[in-house]
Image: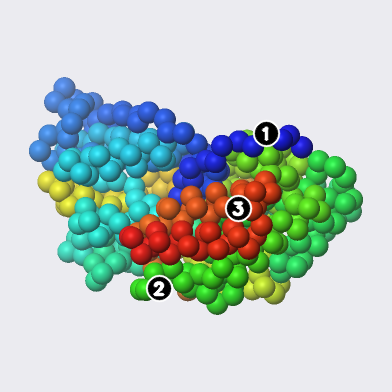
Amino acid sequence: MSAHRPPAHRPRPVAPHGTASRRSVLGAGATALLASPLVAGCGPGADRGGRGGSDGLRVSWYGGVPVHEGVDGALAAFGTAHPDIPVTSEKAEFSAYWDKLATQTAGGQSPDVFRMSMSYFQEYADRGALLDLSDLIGDPLDISSLDADVAASGDVGGGTFGIGQSSITHATFRNTRLAEEHGITLPAAWSWDDFAEFCRSLAGAAGEGVYGSTDASGSFQIFEVWARQHGIDQFTEEGYAGTAELVEEWFALWQGLRAAKAVPPADITAEAGGFENSPLSLGSAAVEFGWVQQITFYQPFLPEAPLEVAPVPGMTAGDLSGQFVKALDLWCVAATSANPENAAQLIDFLVHDEEAVRSIGLTLGVPPSESSRELLAAAPDTPEGRAIAYVESVTGSTGEAPGPWPVGYSTLLDAFSRVSQDVAFGDADPSAAADDFVAQAQEAIAAG
């Protein structure tokens, strides 16, 4: 194993469910903001910059190429259907997007409609940057067909400040073919003990360089499932309520798997920054953790091995109490928008229109209504079909969806990634790292 330790990365909160990069816990540097006017119609009067006229809209979102292509297509369809509402678009990689949006918001120049991560939703709502959409729900903004958890995802403080674009939940992606090649069977439902046993068994049977799973020790969002399985709601009105004991137990679990060579060593994990670099994609690990729709990002790297979508391990096999189904990003309208009704009409189009639904597909997550999922008509043996079937199979069996993540949540993602890496590289033991994280978490949430 290389002695080189890469520098700690800045995480991108929640980014995996809507980008072409998996670095939610091992983030990347920002790229320049991309701006491309989308003109509703092609007539000579179309405005190709700014707001596009008195009724025009600026729309902004984050993501990678698949997201950009999907939303661009949906907005082009909106332009054809509504040539009287010119639209211009701004899009960026996750980190660059938030830097730009913060500057725009501070200067009173927010886009009319923009994509909002649950990691920052509470902060922007508290700052008065988001329009309460309550008066626009029903007409022109119909949410009656949305899944219940999605419809409520944008509710905070007695108002509705965002509309969920997708239903997502935690998942594991499993290369059953790799396991079967070495005589190991992946259980349909599993506990954490089952998971650890599987990882050790596959690594032992396959030999050096093949692992049961990638190392998810630095993922605060998967740790949240673990905490909920232990009956701990980490966020209360008083602040951060997680315990150092629970964090220590989590880090110790993964430390043991690394010691057994059942998951990759620290340097491989630290450098596995994109979907294409994941040990799952490279065929050297049988399991990866993430958000359900990420199967569509991983599967192209394994064309001969159809990935199975399954739950995160539970305290007992089949226990889904730690998971939840929810919209973790939303479409929001700026409180400063001069055209709130047009903005609401656009959001309604993105969520419901047939052409928009087909263009966006699963790039932002599983469509948030039964009618939209049926519209995609994804074949059961496709990645899209497996993702949709998985969400539908666990809905109603998972734990209650949490409210918006608190102000300071993104700081926790960073801190958790950093201290977990300290453990992985031997710079801290699980106990010291857990104490460090909890102290940072309490400070960050209190400051928020």
In percent of width and height, residue 222 lies at: 57, 59
Q: Which residue is mark 1?
A: 4
Image quarter of residue 238: bottom left
Mark 3 residue element: helix
Mark 1 residue element: loop
Q: Are dots 1 and 3 in contact, CB under 8 Å?
A: no
N-terminal-most mark, 2 or 1: 1
In percent of width and height, residue 142 lies at: 28, 61
Query: Three-letter amino acid code at disc 2?
Result: Thr
Q: Is residue 32 above or below residue 321?
A: above
Q: Is residue 190 above or below residue 41?
A: below
Quadrant position of the C terminus in the picture:
bottom left
Query: Local crowd at mark 3 within 10 Å, few (<14), some, or many (≥20)?
Result: many
Query: Local crowd at mark 1 within 10 Å, few (<14), some, or many (≥20)?
Result: few
Residue at 78% in and 53% down: 259
Q: Which residue is mark 3?
A: 420
Whether residue 396 is visible: no
- For the residue pair 374 and 271, the one nearer the viewer reads as 271
How many marks the image carries: the answer is 3
Q: Which residue is mark 2?
A: 236
Whether residue 98 is visible: yes
Query: Three-letter amino acid code at disc 1?
Result: His
Image quarter of residue 402: bottom left
Q: Is residue 379 left or right of residue 279?
A: left
Q: Mark 2 and mark 1: span between their CA atoms?
A: 40 Å
- For the residue pair 432 and 397, the one nearer the viewer reads as 432
Q: Is residue 80 left or right of residue 292?
A: left
